[in-house]
Image: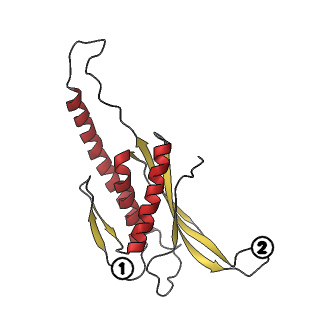
Amino acid sequence: MNCEVCQLKELEVEHFEIREVLRCILHTIVFHRALGLVRPKDVDLELFEITYVQCGVVELEKKIDEKIEHFVSWVEKHPNKKSQICISFYEVKSKPPSWFSNKTERLFWEQWYVNLNVTQHPKPHSGKSHHTKVVVDPGESASEERGSRRVALEVSLREVMFQIIKFVNEKKDHVPPISEGVIYFPHEITVPRKFQ
């Protein structure tokens, strides 16, 4: 079976934006791979003028939030590093029993790589330099920079959401047949390991 891979555009985020950005992306992916009857739930982001849709399944929301918290913990221990979180969809197949193996195996058919560059922007410095005696209000300059960076991130996040929708609409042949009673495909979310 072919495993389709989608590398999403890298986003530059600050630590406080990680949770919102990842919730938006992961829930958008899972929603577009939902199979059965779901109760769509619109969610407005607090930091950006973006609304995304969740499946409305409490267990799924908890699972995604738990993985996001693991990711945030990893980022806190490894500041200023590019990071990746992967959501992989799979099919469970039965294998012929043998002495040393499981009776089931996971056949991965789709993987999404969410790439984040988590930055810590420097604290504002005094506007003085050794070349000039002009003093600029560092708070104003930092505020403008943060505002323009926030707008750029919002635009990039929208692009990622459209990238997800485009991928889902164009790549359908690898999706396995739907099992009866299943609301969404089995999946796993992997975050960087503790020892990296």
**Residue at numbered disc 2:** 100
For the residue pair 46 and 11, the one nearer the viewer reads as: 46
- Tell me, yes or no, if residue 142 can be seen here: yes
Q: Position of residue 178 (x, y in %)?
A: 49, 82
The 10 Å Cα crowd at callout 1, few under 14, some 14 to 19, many 20 or more, is: some
How was the colour assigned to the protein in this rendering? secondary structure
Question: In this image, 151 relative to 1: left or right?
Answer: left
**The residue positioned farthest toward the bottom in the image shown:** 180
Q: Judge whether 24 appears above or below 12 on screen.
A: below
Q: Which mark is residue 159?
A: none
Q: Judge whether 192 appears above or below 98 on screen.
A: above
Residue type marked 1: Val
Q: Position of residue 125 (x, y in %)?
A: 30, 25
Residue type marked 2: Phe
Disc 1 versus disc 2: distance between alpha carbons? 39 Å
The 10 Å Cα crowd at callout 2, few under 14, some 14 to 19, many 20 or more, is: few
Q: Which mark is residue 38?
A: 1
Foreground label between 1 and 2: 2
Tell me the quarter of the picture where residue 167 sits.
bottom left
Residue at 29% x, 12% y is: 131
- Tell me, yes or no, if residue 32 can be seen here: no
Q: Position of residue 162 (x, y in %)?
A: 35, 60
Mark nearer the N terminus (1 vs 2):
1
